[in-house]
Image (spheres, rainbow, N blue to C red):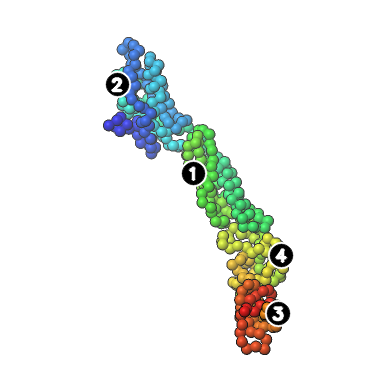
Amino acid sequence: MNACSTVGSPFGVKLGASMALACGLAGTAMAVPTVDTQGGPWLRIEMRPQVQVRQTLVRLGDVALLTSPDLALLKRAMSIPLGQAPRAGETVQLESERLGYWLRTRTGLQQDQIQWEGATATTVGTATRELPGEEVLAPARAALLARIKDAARQRGLLQPRIELEAVSVPGNMQVPVGEIVLRVRPGTPQALNRHMLIWVDVFVAEQHVRAVPVRFDVGLFALAPVATRELAIGSAIESDGIALREVDVAGLPETASLVAWAGDQTVEAKAPSLVRRHTPAGSVITEDRLQRAPTVARGDWVSLVTRNGLLSLESRAEVLQDGQVGQVVRARPVNGTGVLLARVVGPGQLESQP
């Protein structure tokens, strides 16, 4: 069994901070120094009462003052890894007795060859700086704004206007000293909603230190067709029944597509439509509320063309069922008692099927 499996990190687990063991860097024990110490200690270690480290991996030279007549021994002793630095805001207690056992297993020195001075224990913390919450809020807002603009473009919204209000502004936070990088988490695509969440990951010296949630109230306004009066089921959509108004579409379901009128700002140029669902005045007109009016409707009298080779015969017929262009419907010729099948070729026009 090697030393790493028998000797834990001198940090151990103290005050809620879990310190990782850095065994792989220790290697074999150091060679015994060849310098004549004239009976004195080969290594003097003065423990500091407390230290604030700035790097992830804590070494012996970070927490104590070391002296030795052997320069090689001194350098190697100072570089001995003790473990991972505690997280920002936490501390760990490093006791000289525990450190002494750890040190002897890695230097080959005997207990009487090491002289301990200073404090009996060192409180180790991580040097921190304050990260203002506003610095985290800014990239979250920019990322959400870009996502909503993209969603508005994909939905073909007319004259979109976006309002964002942060409802959970991050507080100022303590992070380790070092280069700070803020990265907005891409996550999965969110449905456009009145309340949206953005995650910002905080990295210091390429180490992830925390994730910050930022919540926003969202308003996405655009010109959309709105019913100016109550629309009954089956009624035809007319120009005076719809007006383009600015509405908040953030709360609309993703499946509720706005009708194409919003893009043209006109109603007259569109194909006739009928109301599929009861629509109160002031409701936004979405595709699921409408159905296209039939090209020919049951009860209409239309022109019926019958072809026989190069000859064409035109007569009148009563349509017996609704139909769109290209569909085959039943019809009854004028003064006739039988029913025939005819294809819809246009408004008010049928062509008999052979």
Q: Earlier in the sequence, mark 1 or mark 4?
A: 1
Going by the numbered disc 2, the residue's amino acid type is: Gln
For mark 1, give the secondary structure: strand
Residue under circle 4? Answer: 266
Q: CA distance from mark 4 to mark 2?
A: 93 Å
Instruction: Please report contact status of discs 3 and 1: CB closer than 8 Å, yes or no.
Output: no
The first of marks 4 and 3 along the sequence is: 4
3 vs 1, front mark? 3
Residue picked out by circle 1: 211
Q: Amino acid at mark 1?
A: Ala
Residue lying at 72% horizontally and 68% vertically, measured from the top left: 268
Question: Residue 182 versus residue 175: which sits nearer the camera?
Answer: 182
Residue 41 coordinates in the image, percent (x, y): 33, 16
> What's the amino acid at mark 4?
Thr
> On residue 141, which mark appears?
none
Q: Which residue is mark 3?
A: 311
Q: Are marks 4 and 2 in contact (CB under 8 Å)?
A: no
Quadrant in which residue 352 is drawn: bottom right
